[in-house]
Amino acid sequence: MNESSSGVAGQSLPEGTVTFLFTDIQGSTKLLRRLGDSYGAVLGAHRTLLRAAFARNAGREVDTQGDAFFVAFSDAWGAVNAAVESQLALLEHPWAHGEPVLVRMGIHTGDPLLIEGHYVGIDVHRAARICSSAHGGQIVLSEASLQAIGKPPVVAIRFADLGRHRLKDLEQPEHLYQVIEDGIPSEFPALRSLKPPTNVPRHVGGLVGRSQEKQDLERMLRVDGARAVTVTGPGGTGKTRLAAAAALDLLDHFSDGVYFVDLSAANDAALVSSAIGQVVGVQGEGEEPLVDAIVNALHDRRMLLLLDNFEQALDGAVVVSDLLHRAPHLSVLVTSRIVLSIEGERELSLAPLVLPHDRSRSAVEESEAAELFIERARQARPGFVLTDENAGAVADACILLDGLPLALELAAARIKLFSPAALVHRLN
């Protein structure tokens, strides 16, 4: 480690591999408005407490703006220890306004350039973005810092895995960790990171019924660790809508995104590869097989592919199997009339919606098929309501259509023109 000047007050700054600590007060503007002239004393006490912790751990103050600090350390452990000591000091201080000052902190280790006393490079921005993702009272650090620390010299300090997160202006997600110490809070909301990218369609009208099936899908992929799940069922049972709803709810689990791949026009393995490559932005170059190019692009990415209408191209199952074997963080959610028969595949067989067990209004109200019919009928004719008089006809329509969601939606759209009884007459 070399040192060169200069930081704040002429301090020499570390060069080579450096660990950055960024801090700022959460809600400082609101605090300023609330405290008025008293805010200056609070800000001054905050600065005194943090600067003492930085000094004890050989931190060099690079910059200070308002309520924010930018500090450099020659080793990652010094940054972590300074952050922990700072949080403890903030909690223990007798604040005149009666509540602690909440400071978010972000730590990252890299190899920035030091030019004329200023650090230059993406690592500075990365550390700042990590700080911005945290909540007041929370310390978040990058995987690079965790690796630089190795085995923590203090047993009381641990690190909780927060997963991979996309941060503003950074191309690749960051694997982030939270510093845990018994004296500081450990429970915080989800990080303030960007939502993973997705092109999964949000169907108009949402998902009606299928709550148990949706929970089952999410459990398989989120909890059970299944990497290949196929939703099977006859045409019109709502496989795509169910899979899309589950996939969107899994966005927080797949930090590199959830992508919808339409395979309705694919009828062989090559077209399956092409459709996947087009969606994830990968093209084969030269003589490199497209599957190899996709594997290279997705190898380290935690991603979910929703492969829709796979029954059109069952020859492409070998492509999916190859991707899953060679891209260890990739998962697939498939809709198909039949399973792919690949290793590790889990199946969720989708039956038609539950039908009314009789023609009474109460039975109709308890039926998933009738719930969907009524919901779509209201979209077609606002003001449509289920009554004792029309309940029997609604039940008949659901039974005639075998509880198939697509058929129910198409029929319900005609309520704009026909009464339920007239619709049943036409269906017969």
Image (tube, grey):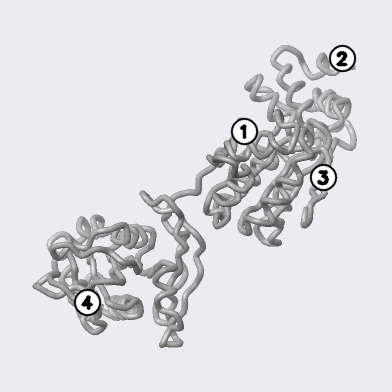
Front tag of 2 and 3: 3
Which residue is identified by label 3? 339
Q: Nearer the viewer, residue 153 or 38?
A: 153
The first of marks 3 and 1 along the sequence is 1
Q: Position of residue 113 (x, y in %)?
A: 24, 63
Whether pointer 2 and pointer 3 mark residues with C-beta atoms closer than 8 Å, the reply is: no
Q: Which of label 4 and label 3 is nearer to you?
A: 4
Q: Is 363 positioned to the left or the right of 331 in the image?
A: right
Three-letter amino acid code at the position of disc 2: His
User: Which amino acid lies under the numbered mark 1 shown in the image of this protein?
Assistant: His
For disc 2, the marked residue is 425
Above or below residue 166? Residue 90 is: below
| Tag 3: amino acid | Val
**For the N terminus, which image quadrant?**
bottom left
Which residue is labeled 4 in the image? Answer: 2
Extreme residue toward the left, this view: 9
For label 1, the SS is: loop
Q: Residues within 10 Å of mark 1 (few under 14, many from 20)?
A: few
Q: Residue 80, located in which quarter of the rendered image?
A: bottom left
| Alpha carbon distance from label 4 to label 1 | 58 Å
Q: Label 1: which residue?
A: 203
Nearer mark to the viewer, of 3 and 1:
3
Left of 83 or right of it: where is 205?
right
